[in-house]
Amino acid sequence: MPDLLIELFSEEIPARMQARAAADLKRLVTDGLVEAGLTYESAGAFHTPRRLALTVEGLLAESPAVREERKGPRTDAPEQALAGFLRSTGLEKDQLEARDDKKGQVWFAVIDKPGRPAAEIVAEVLDATVRNFPWPKSMRWGAGSLRWVRPLHSILCLLSDESGATVVPLEIEGIVASDKTAGHRFMAPETFSVTSFEDYETKLKRAFVVLSAEERAEKIWHDASQMAFAHGLTVVEDKGLLAEVAGLVEWPVVLMGDIGADFLGLPSEVLQTSMKEHQKFFSVQNAGGKIVRFVTVANRDTSDDGATILAGNQKVLSARLADAKFFWENDLRIAKTDITQWTDKLADVTFHRKLGSQAERVDRMADLAREIAPLVGADADEAETAARVAKADLSSEMVYEFPELQGVMGEYYAREAELSDEIAAVAREHYQPLGPSDDVPSGPLSVAVALADKIDTLTGFWAIDEKPTGSKDPFALRRAALGVIRLALENDLRLPLDRFFDAQILRHQIETSDQAERSLLQAVLQEIARHGVFSSAARAVVDQFEGDAPEWVEKVVGHKPDVSDDLLGFFHDRLKVFLRDKNIRHDVIDACLSMPGKDDMTLVTRRADALQAFLATEDGENLTQGFKRAHNILKQAEEKDGVEYSFGPDPKLAEDGAETALFDALDAAEAEIAPAMEAEDFGAAMRAMAGLRAPIDAFFETVQVNADSQILRRNRLNLLHRISATCLIVADLTRIDG
């Protein structure tokens, strides 16, 4: 069984595309081989800046012969049907066989497909792969029509076994496949022949090319760490940068350089970001966490041990850091004198063409942060102040140059403006969490502003009907919703999200420049956030208008919750994903989302945790079955009789001991469930409910619900309703599977 080796050798492939391209090469080639009948034992893909390589081991020498029978039309079918069948099989009529079938004679085609040699199939598959390769971006060069990410120079395609290696006959746009490749561009540019993957990998390393990206990354990290350790320093870990740099070199040579003394006073984040984004340097820090040196990775050995390379890198880095130092000093001067210069400039920065400027967004955030503050233990005035300065650094020169430092610089500048440490921290922390593993802020001010920021973003895009579709989410709204959920759950917050949604959607829809009207509008929206859009408190504020009310009053009075309901449904979808990742069953989540308070993510999660734990017990599982039996009998009777059996059952009509025991058990359970639910102690409520298991089982074993006496039947159906209602207090058990 031969092994296959493929290499596609080109100009430098962008580092961000290499891993995906190697995986695509493996997928396209192996899928094509298997589809053509060539199975294999294993396959591995590799990538360097100038090559994609694939090794396939244990490949069949040829595809197996295949005999296929196809049933066609009846022998007396119209000629058009027969002609179509012949076209699909590639046979003539005299090659068909007439066979007896249940409904008469039918034409059968017997198609023999002989086996094909592996080389022929490999050539076809690789040709199709190269011509249709899914590069994110590609180019043409010269006079040919072939498209590749960068000009393709050569193709190595080899089948090897015990008897030796054979080049697969293949030509693509004038590039003829061979057994040759080349080494490092500068250190060993000569071509050489190979006979197998092992020979290929070994000779590449002799030619100063490390084929494995993982091996290159390990070498970079090992050498950098050892070099830093020798100086009593450590390298700042950055897995993304490590993967990128490993894709920029074929022969990694680690060098450590100095940062000019003039720049060591810059914040570590500025140094690290500037070096990473512009130079692809790793930051090296001392024991105190201060960035003091850098590590760069060259692509070759040099006679001066990298001294010339380091000198050039340090010169370029000094120029970059000089710019950063100018931005930093200029920004500090503004922050110390008047940070409101930046907040005023936000009026000229567009957030979204349909949602206004960043200044308008900050106004909405500040209003919402005031309303959220009491629920998270923050002072309302401080929450408003924090929200108004949280985005100030967006106008700074440093953030203009390095957008990824937004928030980080804001914290520095807020401290320079002599704001409190808590308010300064909000500038950085209100963006968090940025992902499922990112830290969640816990400071009350940061939590209030982070929630206001994310809720304003979500309600704004829902108000203009710009929602995520399929896999597209250009404004990261799924991430924002997950951020709200994590902020609520990890800080154990009780937030009536639906009311905040309605209030903020109205803020997006209503504009007024009149200060008196604005004050009244704010009062209305605050009442909506506290009590709901249709509350008497909100209506009382609206009724303060005398004479002709402003136009926006009609928007408040006529507001419909359709948009906020849809947004809440979006949150429920995000919560389901979040809880499923924590192994909460989908039916448990649905059962809890059907209950009151479904806009309170913490309440839903507590209920779901308790319900899942309850259902994992024998009592929980059996009680659920007993409930469903009672519920189903009740519903069937109600549909049949056309009445609702929801009146209190009379224990005096109980004839059987099991029936009397069930009445007593329900009385006892309800006495425990009610206070437990009031205290939101769902575990205690469910434990009380578990006491109903045995009485319900005994009731169904000994009592006939559909008794001949209509009085007894009606009373027992009302008793089933009581069972159902008692169990449904905790969760909608009708949604539990099984």
Image (tube, rainbow, N blue to C red):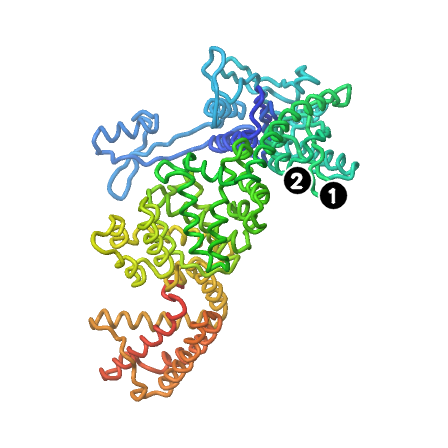
Q: Residue at x 41, y 69 (%)?
A: 730
Residue 227 position within the rendered picture, expressed as x and y whole percent measured from the top left:
76, 34
Q: Do the residues labelled 1 and 2 touch (CB within 8 Å)?
A: no
Rendered image quadrant of residue 291: top right
The quarter in which the N terminus is drawn is top right
Q: Is residue 646 left or right of residue 522?
A: left
Q: What element carries label 1?
A: loop
Q: Residue at x 66, y 24 (%)?
A: 200
Estimate the x, y position of residue 173 in percent, counting from the top left.
49, 14
Mark 2, residue position: 237
Residue located 35% across and 59% down the image? 527
Percent of width and height locating residue 181: 63, 19
Label 1 and label 2: CA atoms lie apart by 14 Å
Neighbor class of circle 1 (other Cα within 10 Å; few <14, some 14-19, many 20+) is: few
Q: Could you tell whether 193 is left or right of 336 in the image?
A: right
User: Within 10 Å of the Cα at label 2, are there few (<14), some (14-19), or many (20+) other Cα atoms?
Assistant: few
Q: In this view, does 613 lie above or below 81?
A: below
Look at mark 1 in the image and give the residue it sits on: 287
